[in-house]
Amino acid sequence: MVPTPHNTSLALLLPILCSGLANILLGTSSLYWKALGNIPPITLLSYRVVLSAITLSAFILLCRNTHAIKHLPPKLIRLHCMASLFIAINWGAFIWSSINGHILESGLGYLLAPFISIALGAIIYNESISRTRALSTLAAFTGVALLIAFTPHLNHWVYLTIALSWGAYTYLKKSTVLDAVNGLCVETLFLTVCMALAISLLKLPIMAPNEFSAGPNQLIWLAGGVSAIPLLMFSYATGKIPLSITGFLQFTLPLTLIAISVVT
């Protein structure tokens, strides 16, 4: 069947919807992490990594889809290991900002990240950007820069860390041919090993499961789904739509975060 503009538009619709919804879910997840604010961030990050790895591994085993992971070329392994480090940095900064009252900085970080994605798409993948889209991007970037310049008492490392780590992660996910589930599973398994080594060597104080009191703290067991589901949707969409479109859709995440920071 010869592809037509109509068929192409329909093929892009699902990944575009997935990308938009994933960004909204990632934004609203700040409320989830805020509810767990009395648990140390390093414990939250550790459980987020391990429970995500368990969730994804169980899904792959249930679907009997282990072939892709068993036959991964070294180049792909290196790419996903590098991506995992960026997402770990992003997760850590996002958790810390959510429970320490810096949701606005998170929003600014995710506002800056799309510009990184759009720039990488144009430079690395030679994706064309229309004059209208280029002007709107420039106007948006100017607005963000002015917002940062005239907003007092910002924690600058938060939004810079989030912007750079998320922008780099988006670029690396665009560079892989591995499907979303297996790719994210490789990343979380690698992070689980790194986390175990860090806890052992650095003697990090991680809370044991029996130390979680009843009530909100029990929400931590949902961390695997809260983390994996939106990232799976995002990874699926990123591999199917241009990086420039992914960048524009990412604006829904910071807008969600900024709305939450205003309301709460």
Image (cartoon, grey):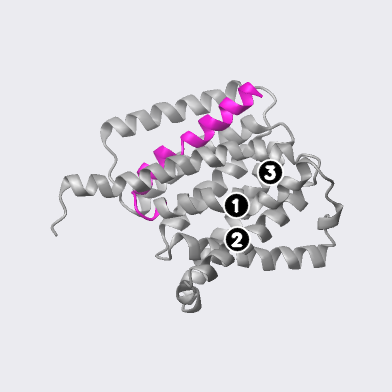
Side of 144 relative to 95 (left or right): left
The residue that mark 1 highlights is 225
Between disc 3 and disc 2, the foreground one is 2
Which comes sooner in the sequence, label 2 or label 1?
2
Spatial CA span between label 2 and label 1: 7 Å
* Badge 2 density bin: few <14, some 14–19, many ≥20, Cα 10 Å: some
The image's mark for residue 55 is 2
The residue that mark 3 highlights is 95
- Residue 189 is drawn in which quadrant? bottom right
Percent across and percent down for residue 9 are 24, 44
Spatial CA span between label 3 and label 2: 20 Å
Q: At x 71% / y 63%, what residue is drawn?
A: 195
Which comes sooner in the sequence, label 3 or label 2?
2
Percent across and percent down for residue 183 are 49, 63
The answer to the question of whether label 3 and label 2 lie on touching residues, with beta carbons closer than 8 A, is no
Q: Main secondary structure of the magenta part?
A: helix
The residue type indicated by label 1 comes to: Gly
The answer to the question of whether label 2 and label 1 lie on touching residues, with beta carbons closer than 8 A, is yes
Query: Does the magenta portion include 260?
Result: yes
The residue type indicated by label 3 comes to: Ile
Quarter of the image with the N terminus in it: bottom left
Q: At x 41% / y 51%, what residue is drawn?
A: 238
Spatial CA span between label 1 and label 3: 15 Å
Q: Secondary structure at mark 2?
A: helix
Percent across and percent down for residue 143 are 47, 24
Which comes sooner in the sequence, label 1 or label 3?
3
Tell me which segment is drawn in magenta.
Answer: 238-264
Quarter of the image with the C terminus in it: top right
The residue type indicated by label 2 comes to: Thr
Percent across and percent down for residue 231 are 52, 51
Q: Nearer the viewer, residue 262 or 128?
A: 262
